[in-house]
Image (cartoon, rainbow, N blue to C red):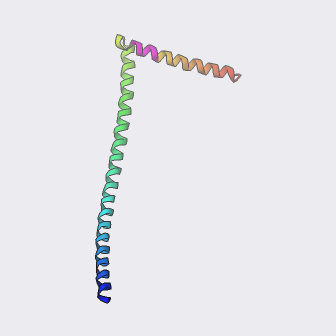
Amino acid sequence: MLSELESNFTALEKQIIKLSREHRRLAESYEDLLAEHTELKHKYEDTYRQNQELLEEQKKIKIMSSIAGNPEHNRLMKNHINRLVKEIDACIAQLHNSGL
């Protein structure tokens, strides 16, 4: 009975050592993945910001092109002016409603 308990204890001890190694390996892997995730997140944010800046630049170029008389962008300019006029009308309406 004692030898059976010792062999069970030895087997259990081996399993604990094996699980401990696996836990350490998984913890290291987790840290590596976490660092990679952080790095990729920063890259994504930088790329997203650059994309937004390029979109704004593209809008500005289209507006400048339409102002310069490029017929392809005349509709864009008209839409932009109409949108600005609507915003101004809404502001005037709010001023009238507020009693100013």
User: In which quadrant will I find the C terminus?
Assistant: top right
The reply, left or right, for residue 46 in relation to residue 93 is left
Locate residue 99: give its quadrant. Answer: top right
Q: Position of residue 86 (x, y in %)?
A: 54, 17
Is 91 positioned to the left or the right of 49 in the image?
right
Identify whether 26 is placed above or below 68: below
Quadrant assignment for the N terminus: bottom left
Residue at the (51%, 19%) spot, across then down: 84
Q: Quadrant of residue 65?
A: top left
Q: Position of residue 50 (x, y in %)?
A: 35, 35
> In the image, what residue occupies the spot 58% across and 17% down?
89
* Residue 78 on the magenta span: yes
User: Would you say 77 lies left or right of 33 here?
Assistant: right
Residue 77 is situated, as x and y percent measured from the top left of the image, at 43, 15
Nearer to the camera, 31 or 8: 8
- Most extreme residue toward the right is 99
Note whether 100 is above or below 39 in the view shown.
above
Inspect the magenta stretch and tell me whether residue 5 lies in it.
no
Give, as a single range, the part of the protein colored magenta: 74-79
Name of the residue lying farthest toward the front = 1
Q: Is residue 70 visible?
A: no
Residue 32 in sight in this render: yes
Residue 82 location (% of width, % of height): 50, 15
- How many numbered circles are shown? 0
Q: In which quadrant of the rendered view does residue 56 lie?
A: top left
Figure check: 67 above or below 59: above
Assign the magenta stretch its main secondary structure.
helix
Q: Nearer the viewer, residue 95 or 17?
A: 17
Residue 44, above or below 68: below
Q: Nearer the viewer, residue 36 or 7?
A: 7
